[in-house]
Amino acid sequence: MTRLERTLLAALLVAGLSPLLAATFFGRSALRDAYSRGVNPVVEEQLAAAVESHREHIVALREAADSTADAITQHWQLHDALRNNDLEAVRRYAQAALGAYPQVAAVRVYRADLDSDAAPGGLSDDDIAATDLDDLDDLDDPTLDETLSDEDGAHDIAPPDDAASDDGPSAPDGGDVDDEADGRTADDALDAADEGGPPLVEVSIAARADPEQVRSLTRERVLDTIEPPARVVVVVTSPRAVFADLQRAGEVTGLYSRLLEQTDYVSDVYVWVLAAYVAFVIALALLVSIWLARRVSKRVLALADATVRVGQGDLAVSVPDDDDDEIGELTRAFNRMVQDLRESRERIDYLKRISAWQDFARRLAHEIKNPLTPIQLAAQEVAQAYRGDDPRFAAMLEDARGIIEEEVATLRRLVGEFSSFARLPEVDLAEADLVELLRDLERGFPSVLQDVYGEAASAESRVMLRLDVPASPVLASVDAMMLKRCLDNLVRNAVEAIAGEARAGAGAVTLRLERGPHQLELSVTDDGPGIEANARARVFDPYFTTKSSGTGLGLAIVKKVVLEHRGRIVCERGEGPAERPGTRFVISMPLG
């Protein structure tokens, strides 16, 4: 792990753990406070009080049901009817009880050993209202006494003070009465009768026992003061909503109590979930940071290694720059710097070689130039001094003199080129319009054709010059005379390449100027036979030429001038077909 990675890791740990601890502490306090405001003992007490109120209401309903059952079963008329086995009187009494107590849905009477041919039946409220009973004055009275009143007076329907509860009423004198007939108690006899068939008398109103609206409270009373004993079942109804409210209130209270008990658990769970989430985020941030730090450190180390290699003289190094971040910008700047250093080294090396060749050309020109004049004069004197009459020898002597003078002229031309190469001046940069410079070359193109072909009129039909320049001026800091000399050399070479091949139709030389945002580009393209790939790499070396009569100094001079303009020149294959691809020379120079 690098120093950068360790530093980033430590910074992230400090920046992440501090919020984690603070969030855990304050989050727990905030959760507990918020939870306690919504779930607190005061609300629980209020809910418990509401449940108790509902429970007391239901207890009151049950007590009312017991009172109603006692009032119905302890009435003297029922007892008299049962003692007399008067089933019709029992039925009338039950119907009257249903009319007097709207909350009663059914009354059933069971006897241990009394048979009846009358079938039990159900009544509606309308049936009770329409019943024609001799001793029932008004079934709608609120009490059974009023309903059962006759000419002799009313009897109180309220149960006696010593009336029993659900376990069965006591005898009027306070003692229990057992039926010992057949060795069975009264309860046994009634149970046997209950299991053996339907009730002796059953009067009910189905509409009052709707299970969707009411809940039935069944109350049983054993009348063991009469013989044989009887069991009276009274079905008292209560609104179902009361019980539903109690159930809902109990459920809410139970849920609230459990929530109150889980206050610490809930807050701890939320805090631990928060802590786990924050810890996960911190761990993820650490992993991502390590990955990013390693990417950065790896690229920085690559730059450092490349810098060491450049310092050792290796200018072929290049660092990958695929990213668009700041490190990528730095890498691209480093690669441009290395490329500039490499081009500067190549430029310096080339200029050194050119300087050496210039010194050699200067000495060579001096050594060759000195004996040329004596040689030419000596040849002329020998030819003029012959006075013989041998025509063959005279002709041979004249031919020799001509050859010597021709070769001396060639040597003088070479010496002149060597001298020009040796005395090549330094460039003098000044602002000039390159468009106008190229138009001057276009105007001087006929003289180039005349030098190559001899007759300009016939040459123009064989080679034409195409000029592709911007419409507006292109200003650049150049040595106009030296640059024009370079371009003239390139155009002349292109014309000579076209003239050296047999072809049908005219050839073309294209002179193009293109301006970019930071540099300009000059190109000279021909559609001649082209230059071999292995020769294109050496065309700028001094004394290397592909022409039979060339000296190999023209392109060397061109490259030297371009380099002194802080530019570069390359030789490329043209865009023509394989049999005549052509050659393209491209000069790139900065605008500044």
Image (cartoon, rainbow, N blue to C red):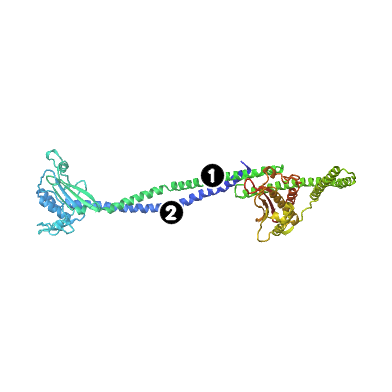
Numbered label tally: 2
- Give the residue drawn at x 65%, y 59%: 470
* Circles 2 and 1 in contact, beta carbons < 8 Å: no
- The spot of residue 265 in percent (x, y) is 44, 46
- The spot of residue 90 in percent (x, y) is 12, 51
- Give the residue drawn at x 70%, y 53%: 589
On screen, residue 133 versus residue 448, left or right, reads left
What is the C-alpha distance between the residues marked 2 and 1? 35 Å
Give the structural element (helix, strand or loop) at label 2: helix
On screen, residue 54 versus residue 207, left or right, reads right
Amino acid type at circle 1 is Ala
Give the quarter of the figure containing the C terminus. Answer: bottom right
- Quick check: can you spot residue 565? no
Instruction: Give the farthest residue toward the top.
Output: 183
Q: Residues within 10 Å of mark 1 (few under 14, many from 20)?
A: some
Give the quarter of the figure containing the N terminus. Answer: top right
Q: Nearer the viewer, residue 426 or 47?
A: 426
- Between circles 2 and 1, the one closer to the viewer is 1
Q: Nearer the viewer, residue 162 or 234?
A: 234
- Quick check: can you spot residue 90? yes
Q: According to the image, label 2 marks what residue?
A: 37
Amino acid type at circle 2 is Arg
On screen, residue 211 versus residue 366, left or right, reads left
Q: According to the image, label 1 marks what residue?
A: 283
Give the structural element (helix, strand or loop) at label 1: helix
- The spot of residue 332 in percent (x, y) is 64, 48
- The spot of residue 400 in percent (x, y) is 84, 44
Residue 2 numbered tag: none
Mark 2 and mark 1 lie on one chain; the one further toward the N terminus is 2
Q: Residues within 10 Å of mark 2 (few under 14, many from 20)?
A: few
Asked which quadrant contains residue 194, the reply is top left
